[in-house]
Structure formats: structure tokens, C-alpha cells
Amino acid sequence: DKTGTLTTNEMRLELLHAAGTNASSLSETDNTSPLWQLLGKALALSTDVTLDQQGRAVGDPTEIALYLGALDGEFIKHDLEEKYPRLAELPFEANRRRMTTLHADDGHVLSFTKGAPEAVLPVCSGQLRLDGSSAALSDELLEQAEQMAAQGCRVLAIACRRFDAVPEMLRPGEIEHEMQFLGLVGLIDPPRPEALQAVRDCRTAGIHPVMITGDHPETARAIAKRLEIASDDVMTGAEMAKLTDDELAARVKELSIYARVSPEQKIKIVEALQAHGEYVAMTGDGVNDAPALKRANIGIAMGQKGTDVAREASDMVLMDDNFASIVRAVREGRRIFDNIRKFIKYTMTSNAGEVWTLFLAPFFGLPLPLVPVQILWINLVTDGLPGLAMSLEQQEKNIMQRPPRPPDESIFAHGMWQHILWVGLLIGGLSLGAQAWAWHGGSENWQTIVFTVLTFSQLLHALAIRSETESLFSIGFFSNPQLLLAVVLT
């Protein structure tokens, strides 16, 4: 689905009229044509776009695109609403895939319907030509819609009907039939420049991007190719409805593109992936997305165009509605997790070294190595300042080239507890060796020597574990100046 609000420089709107001529912009056509007049009014009046204090269009991105397309043809929504006020509407529903608005028109009622071509064309009994005359529906309309979808357009069909008065029963069956087809609208919502790289980063990081959309399969396939999301295999909601849960689970890991999918089917996709042990993050913005957002392991809502219901059902909200922000969050999350591991490794190893020093000294016939104030000083300064500075450590170079860790994996995995054990023994051994040398040598400052060796061993250990895969010489002494400063101060 779309990941950002359309603006005039991101959006291209085309209209393909029913006669089958070449697509053209509203601003490049004869606005006196009855067909184009009705099309322009339909685009302007059937949207729920409002203007903010700065005069910018606010609302659903698709409707903003229609509003701007009408504005391009000098059909101004708020001026037309004074002449053709809205009397009623049938809101969009996932099962109908269309919406209808009814407007006053010189003592009569004019209805405009927009939606998916395969949902609007069946309720049309004819089509209008440029001169306003009616003709039979062309058999090529669905083919034209598929051609536009194959170019990456999100295609909507527009139709209208006149009534003498507002029907008593505001039901789709009473209003959405015997309509006159007006045209096909193609909206191009190009991926953001950073989206392709974000998808590539996902793949190298072991994340499998899946596109789930209500758009036409050809539109989904075209966008997926631009973003290098998987293959030509597209599963539609109609095909999915024929599969059992077991059959879907058997195929779900092979598929990356789903089109014309209902909200209920989104939940099934999430559950099928989870049945394979996958950890699923789901993005969405509408009320219908809320159940799938709630069911996913991580629900991600859009902050700008997302509904309150979607945001409440989610675990994370994207304030810029940008898919690349999810990848940045993964990158930052991995960096934070790595630094937590480094902090635990440093603190536990340092404390283990102190424990081994104090515990083993009597077994070697040595006096108590440290007095309480020295132990407190080590814990306050040696553990504190370098430990805090470790939280500022830069990300590992291969951070987005490694697979995700299992959700139930212990934080002490990958040899951490072994490291704590043997390095703790090493620090303890060095400290006890220094104590034995000074004690048996008759030095009066043997306790200070133990204190110094223990402290410097811990500080050198802090520098040595800055990366789990590279040496200190490889990452550079000055790549974390805060840690270097903390070591110097300590």
C-alpha cells in the first residue's frame, strides 16, 4: 500500500475516456465537453478533502490526488460544492470496493460513483461519449484498465447517474445500478527514492518484504518490480478464498505479492506466516487494518494518514509514513541491542574479576586484596563511566548483513557467558599474580598494586570489547571519543 502522502510533484493523474482515445490530462482537454465536465465534477465533488489553515489539501492520499487532478482542470471543489451540495453518500466498503456521493443539481440529484473498475463496470448500463451521448459499454474497458495497472497506475473507474430525488432507501442496490460510465482514472504513487535501498537492506538483513494491497494485481506487480520485491507470482483475494488454511500456509513463504485482498485475508496471511515461526511486522493505516495490526508480532501504523484506530492497535507509529523509517528503526534497534550486550559483557566480566580476586586470595595464602572503599570506588568509577559511554558506540559494519536473532534467544548467547567466565578469571588471575609478587617481595604498597592492576585490566577490557567482530585497531581508537574520555578520566 502507499507509504506517503501524494503531492503535486509526486503525482501524475491521467484520464482515459470511454471512447478509447489516448490518455490525456484534464488541463489539456476541452473543458466544455459534457463528458469532461462530468468527470471534473466527479473528481472534485466525490472526495472528502479539506484544506488546512495554510490552504493545503488534507485527507486520504488517493482523494488528495483526485482533488489535485480536478484542480489542474480548473474544477475547484469548494466552489462546486456551493452549486452541487452533497445530499448523501454511500461510504466505501471493502466488499463493494466502491463509494457513491449524491449531489443536488438544479432540482434533480446527481450521483457519482468511484471504485475498482471490476466493481464499477458491472453496475453500469452504458457509457458517455465526449459529446454527452450515451453508448453501449465497450468490451475493451477492463483491458484498458489492466494496461494502465501494468504501468504502475492505481486505476479507478468513475460513473454517474441522475435521479429525480434522493432515493428513500440509501442502499447500494437502489443507487448503484444502471449508471453511466465516465472514465478510468490512473494514479501513479511512485515509490520514494529511498524505498528501493530500504527493500535491499531488508533482504540483506534477513527480512522478507511482502506487499499486501487492495489494488489491481497488475498494479501490485508493477510496483513490486520497481522495488525488487520478489517474482511475478501474485495471489489475489479471490484465489486465496479458494484455499484452505493449510494450503495457504504451504504457499505463503513462496509469495511476496498479494492483491485485491480483504481485511480478513490480511489476518490469514499474518497467521500463516506465524505458523512457520516467522516474526511478522505489519504496516497499515485504515480501520480495516487494525485487526491484522493487532494480530502481527509488531503492528506499525502510519502517523500522518493513519486512523486513530490503526494507531491504537499498533506497537509503533511512523511519524513520516516512510517505509525506509522501519529499516532505520531495525538498524538502530540492532545497534542498541548490541550495545546492551557489550554493557552487560563489560559489567559482568568486571564484577567477575573482582569476585575471583577476593574469593581466591585466601586459597593462595594471601591477605584480603582490597579494602571496602577500594571496591566501592571501582564499582562507582570503573563500571559507571565506561559503561555509560558504551551506549554511544557506533553500529557494527555488518549490522544489516546478518540474519535476525531468534526472539526467544538469550542475551547471553553467542559465547557471552563463556567470555564472562574466562576473562573474569583472567582479570582475577592477573590481579592475584600482582598481589603475590608485591606481597612476597615485601612491598608496602601491594594493596595499591592490586587495585591498579584490577582497574586497568577492566579499562583495557572495555576497549577490547567495543566490537564483537572487529579488533580495536580495525574500528579505530577515536571512533567512540566518549568512551576514550571515560577511560582517561577513570
Image (cartoon, grey):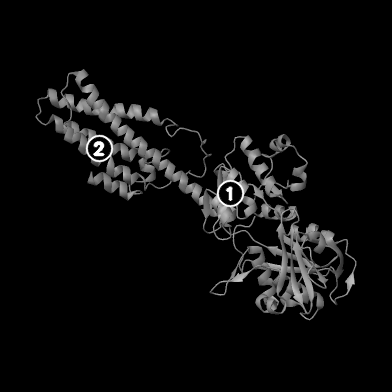
Splitting the image into 4 quarters, where does residue 73 fall?
A: bottom right
Residue 266 in sight: yes
Say which residue label 2 marks.
Answer: 379
- Left or right, 98 with reference to 430: right
- Residue at 36% in and 42% down: 473
Screen quadrant of the N terminus: bottom right
Residue 65, numbered label: none
Residue type highlighted by circle 1: Arg
| Cα gap from disc 2 to disc 1, whole angstroms | 44 Å
Label 2 element class: helix
Say which residue label 1 marks.
Answer: 200
Splitting the image into 4 quarters, where does residue 340 fall?
A: top left
The residue carrying pointer 1 sits among few (fewer than 14), some (14 to 19) or many (20 or more) residues within 10 Å by Cα, namely: some
Q: Earlier in the sequence, mark 2 or mark 1?
A: 1
Residue 106, percent across and down? Answer: 78, 80
- Residue at 59% in and 50% down: 283
Residue 201 in sight: no
